[in-house]
Image: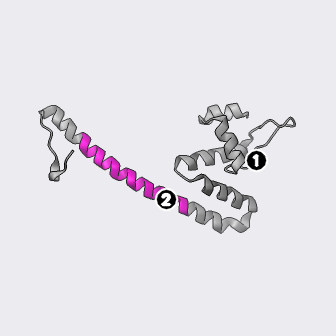
Amino acid sequence: MTIKEVCEKYDITADTLRYYERVGVIPAVTRTAGGIRDYQETDIAWVENAICFRDAGMPVEMLIEYVKLFQEGDSTIDARANLLKEAREAIVEARKKYDIALEKLDYKIGRYEIAQKTGVLTWDDQEEE
C-alpha cells in the first residue's frame, strides 16, 4: 500500500506518517527496491495502533517508548504491559472529566429545552447559567 493510500484510508497526512516513522512512533516502514514506502500488513498494524493511541490522547513520547520496548523483544513484556496500563489509566481519568462535562451539558440543554417550551429559564439547586 502506498503512503497516499494509507493517508486516504486513515484520513491522516503524509507528513504525519513520515513524522511517526522518523521519531519512532511506528517502526521503519517496508520499502521497495527504489526506496519508496510500501506499507505491508505489519506496517499498517503499527499505523493503526499509533492512530488509535494518539486519538486516545497517548503522548508521542509514550508511543516511542512502547515501540522501542517492543523492538527489544520479550524481555520487555512487563515494561510494555506497565506502559499500556499507565496509558489506560490516563485515558480513564480523561474520560471521567468528559463524563462530568457531558452531564453538565445535558443538564443545561435540558433546562433550555424546557425554557423553549415554557418561555421561562430556571435552574435547579441554585445553579446559575
Is residue 6 covered in magenta?
A: no
What's the mark number on residue 82? none
Residue range of the region highlighted in magenta in the rendering: 86-109
Apparent side of residue 93 relative to residue 61 in the rendered image (left or right): left
Label 2 neighbourhood size at 10 Å, few (<14), some (14-19), many (20+)? some
2 or 1: tag closer to the N-terminus:
1
Q: What type is the residue that disc 1 sits on?
A: Ala
Q: Which quadrant of the rendered structure holds the N terminus? A: top right
Q: Position of residue 81 (x, y in %)?
A: 61, 64
Label 1 neighbourhood size at 10 Å, few (<14), some (14-19), many (20+)? some
Q: Quadrant of residue 63?
A: bottom right
Q: Position of residue 25 (x, y in %)?
A: 66, 50
For the point 55% across and 63% down, which residue is it? 85
Would you say the magenta stretch is mainly helix, strand or loop?
helix
Q: Quadrant of residue 93?
A: bottom left
Q: What type is the residue that disc 2 sits on?
A: Ala
For the point 72% across and 43% down, which residue is it? 41
How is this picture coloured? one colour
Q: Is residue 7 above or below residue 80?
A: above
Secondary structure under badge 2?
Answer: helix
| Callout 2–callout 1 Cβ contact below 8 Å | no
Q: Position of residue 115 (x, y in %)?
A: 16, 36
Q: Is residue 69 above or below residue 117?
A: below
Q: Position of residue 84 (x, y in %)?
A: 58, 60
What's the mark number on residue 28? 1
For the point 29% across and 48% down, which residue is it? 104
For the point 17% across and 37% down, which residue is it? 114
Apparent side of residue 120 relative to residue 92 in the rendered image (left or right): left
Apparent side of residue 24 relative to residue 129 in the rendered image (left or right): right
Distance in Å between CA atoms under marks 2 and 1: 28 Å
Q: Which quadrant of the rendered structure holds the C terminus? A: top left
For label 2, the residue is 90
